[in-house]
Amino acid sequence: MTRRDLPTYTLGELASLLGARLVGDPDCRISGLATLKEAGPDQVAFLANRAYLKDLPQTRAAAVLLQSQHGEACPTARLELDNPYLGYAALSRLLDPLVGRRPAGVHSSAVVDASVILGERVEVGANAVIEAGAVLGDDVTVGSGSVVGADAEIGAGSRLHANVTVCHGVVIGERVILHSGCVIGGDGFGFAHDGSRWHKIAQLGGVVLGDDVEVGSCSSIDRGALGDTLIGNDVKIDSQVQIAHNVQIGDHSALAGCVGIAGSTKVGRHCMLGGGVGLSGHLTICDGVQVTGMSLVTNSINEPGVYSSGTGAMKNVQWRKNAVRFKQLDDIAKRLSRLEKERDG
């Protein structure tokens, strides 16, 4: 798609679509988004963080999405919203070059089993493989080199980018986005040890993804050992995330990059796990929990709130001294307990 093929809108149209108050020329036409510093005269910028207020007076954008309280400092047209970042999100979707692209049908190099059920306007890219019994809903896109396993189901409006693997029997909801390299439904890490070697446990469950889920590149969601691994509606999963077998994640939760969740752990609704968070297996995390980056959670969390573990970065010399003291904490606690008993006795 060339630059001239990108969607364009007038500021008047954008104000109507976003529910914003426009101050400026409604006939001004824009075709892109950019930052306050980099935006040109055919682009819209946004101000959602006060740290960037310093860039507002010098912006060359055609218009700026912002709160009304910052309107007087804006040197150009403006679209006033209570939540400019939410407006930016909506505008980014309107200007996405993939939106509105006509499906290309099934590429001649794709391999689609005769038993596959394809909905209306399905696009299957070059060298993709759709195995027997799979069902693809209307407006599904399967990118080049992707594989949809036997008896898998993909809901309407979902998009698999290039080189995605959806394994056999996986069920994917509507409007799901799977980015390149992710694997949905690979075997969980299940082995039995006889004292000298490991014996594989067949993973007989599946994976069910709800509606409006997004999974980042090179992330893995393993199939269940017996029951299914369950990902709720509107769950957002970043790149390089590992979700083990039989994990359950509640609706509207978000997982940042490099999160790892061990088997059979249940994460509630509206939870947020920061980058590099690790959850041990067989835990329960209640609704409304936020775990900050690089934390390790080894016990269930039963009350909503923000949780952290680990220590912040410091100079190595200081860290080595603290590491020694960490080892002494138990002894210090016991000594303190004895002193308290002697004082109270």
Image: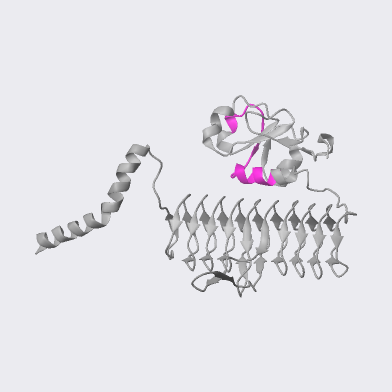
Q: Is residue 139 visible?
A: no
The magenta-colored residue range is 71-91
Quadrant (top left/top right/bottom left/bottom right) for the N terminus: top right
At 31% from the left edge and 45% from the top edge, which residue is drawn?
322
Q: Quadrant of residue 254?
A: bottom right
| Side (left or right) of 90 relative to 107 | left
Please indicate, yes or no, whether residue 237 appears anywhere in the rendered image: yes
Expressed as whole percent of the image width and height from the top left, the position of residue 273 reads 52, 54
Name the one closer to the observer, 41 or 124. 124
Residue at the extreme front of the image, as rendered? 196
Residue furthest toward the right? 108
- Which residue corresponds to the image point at 53% horizontal and 57% vertical from the top-left? 260
Residue at 74 percent across and 45 percent down: it is 94
Residue 115: horizontal and vertical position, in percent? Answer: 86, 70
Left or right? Give the position of 87 relative to 141: left
Is residue 192 left or right of 40 when viewed as pictured?
Answer: left
Whether residue 85 is in magenta: the answer is yes
Counting from the top left corner in percent of width and height, residue 170 is at: 70, 67
- Of 103 and 18, nearer the camera is 103
Query: For the point 47% across and 62% down, which residue is it?
Result: 280
Q: Classify residue 153 by image quadrant.
A: bottom right
Q: Quadrant of the C terminus?
A: bottom left
